[in-house]
Image (cartoon, rainbow, N blue to C red):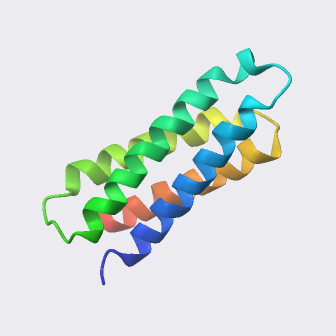
Amino acid sequence: MKNSKLIEALNNCVAHCNYCADACLGEENVKMMVDCIRTDRACAAICSATANLLASNYKDVRGMVEQCRDICKKCADVCAKHDHKHCQECADACRKCEEACNEYLK
C-alpha cells in the first residue's frame, strides 16, 4: 500500500502532538505553553484527518498532504522552542511526518 509509510508517520505525529499538548497543560507556566498547545491540537487534527483520507484510498489528496506538511513544520518549529522532553519529542515526530509528506508528494 503506497500510503502505509505516510499513514504510519501521520499517526505517530498525532500521538506525539496529543501527548505534548496534554503534558504542556501540566507545566508550571501554562500561559507560556499556549501557542504550543494550540499548534499541537491543530497538527493532530489535520494529521488524523489526512491519515483517514489516505486509508480510504481517495485519490485527490495532494492539497491535504501539502497542508499537513506545512502545519507539521510549524508545529516542529513551535515545539522546538521549548526545552521540555515532550516538546522535543513532538518536534522530532513532526519533522519526520513533514519528511514523509514530502516523500509522498514527489
57 to 37, vertically: above or below: below
Q: Nearer the viewer, residue 95 or 32?
A: 32
In screen coordinates, is 36 left or right of 51? right
Quadrant for the N terminus, please.
bottom left
Residue name at image x 43 percent, y 75 percent: 5
In the displayed structure image, the side of residue 40 where residue 26 appears, left or right: right
Instruction: Pinpoint residue 49: horizontal percent, then vertical percent.
Output: 33, 52
Q: Is residue 35 in view from this perspective?
A: yes
Please state if 23 lies on the left or on the right of 4 as rendered: right
Q: Relative to 94, is 34 above or below?
A: above
Q: Position of residue 70 (x, y in %)?
A: 40, 42
Answer above or below: position of 81 versus 94.
Answer: above
Quadrant of residue 55 within the rendered picture: bottom left
Residue beneath the point at 38% across and 77% down: 4
Question: Looking at the image, how many numbered discs can be counted on the residues?
Answer: 0
Q: Residue at 20% x, 72% y: name it.
A: 57
Instruction: Point out residue 63 in the picture as x, y percentages from the top left corner.
Output: 21, 48
Q: Residue furthest bottom?
A: 1
The answer to whether residue 95 is seen in the rendering is no
Across and down, in percent, residue 90 comes to 65, 49
Q: Residue at x 62, y 53 (%)?
A: 16
Q: Between residues 6 and 58, which one lies in front from this camera angle? A: 58
Tell me the quadrant of the picture where the C terminus can be found: bottom left
* Residue farthest right in this picture: 28
In the displayed structure, 92 sits above or below 9; it is above
